[in-house]
Image (cartoon, rainbow, N blue to C red):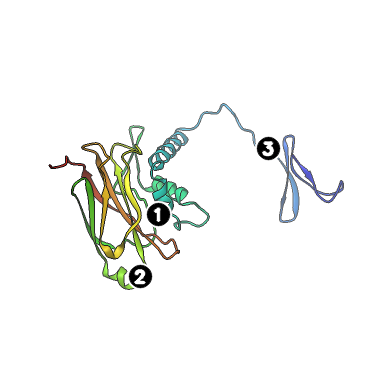
Amino acid sequence: MARVKNGVNGTVSGKVGPSVFCKWKDIYYVRSLPRIKKKRKPTSGQQKNQSKFAFMQESLSSIVRFVRLGFMEYAPNRTGHNSAMSYNLRESVIVEDGRCRLDYEKFAISRGLPSPVCSAEIHQENEHVIIRWKVDDIFRQKYGGRMFRCIALLYPDSGVDPTTIAGVLQDSYLKDQEQIISIEHAPQDTVYHVYLAFLASDGSNISTDSIYLGKITKESTRV
């Protein structure tokens, strides 16, 4: 619907039928609406992009609370979830024979400062996954006065079943060099991809790049 500005003798702004009244640098002009073929089929490239987008939406659907924090400050005027979508669509989707899959080593739950971890290891103990790390000396010297807390995610290899997702948000401090995550409710032999990142707890919302620590399989509990 078009609107008349400054009375009946004023300028028109908006759409009237097939015409659109516009303004550019104090110049008023009229253009026609673009012709859209409603039954037009998407190109193969468009279909591929649509398929990747839907795949990534599903991949992130159960870990939104992780990427909202991890990507919170990644890009201005974007939500953390949108930034995570954009980054992982570009970096971590592999398309083979028309099907999409994640490149788990390139998949990210957080982007920001370089990772403060110079080495890390994972192992299991009594239905818990234990992550231990060593802090990079350069990071410690540069950001030692800023408190960072752990974001860790165990992402199931089988997909996005929310019942098997495990992890912590802003739990152990970087200086603790250890994070324990329970997997007692996960089915036996569940395979997890493990990610580790940190978020500043001083209100700045600065996060670090997440790192991929490899895979771990839930083992039977020893009695």
Disc 1 target residue = 70
Say left or right for 79 vs 3.
left
Residue type pointed to by label 2: Tyr
Quarter assignment of residue 16: top right
Q: Residues within 10 Å of mark 1 (few under 14, many from 20)?
A: many
Front tag of 2 and 3: 2
User: Residue at horizontal 37%, vertical 62%?
Assistant: 113
Q: Secondary structure at mark 3?
A: loop
Q: Report, in whole angstroms, how far the alpha carbon at label 3 lies from the one at label 1.
A: 41 Å
* Mark nearer the N terminus (2 vs 3): 3
Disc 2 target residue = 143
Nearer to us in this view, 203 or 25: 203
Nearer to us in this view, 15 or 187: 187
Q: Report, in whole angstroms, how far the alpha carbon at label 2 lies from the one at label 1.
A: 18 Å
Disc 3 target residue = 33
Nearer to us in this view, 223 or 49: 223
User: Residue at horizontal 45%, vertical 36%?
Assistant: 50
Q: Residue furthest left?
A: 223
Q: Residues within 10 Å of mark 3 (few under 14, many from 20)?
A: few
Residue type pointed to by label 1: Gly
User: Residue at horizontal 42%, vertical 62%?
Assistant: 206
Quarter assignment of residue 185: top left
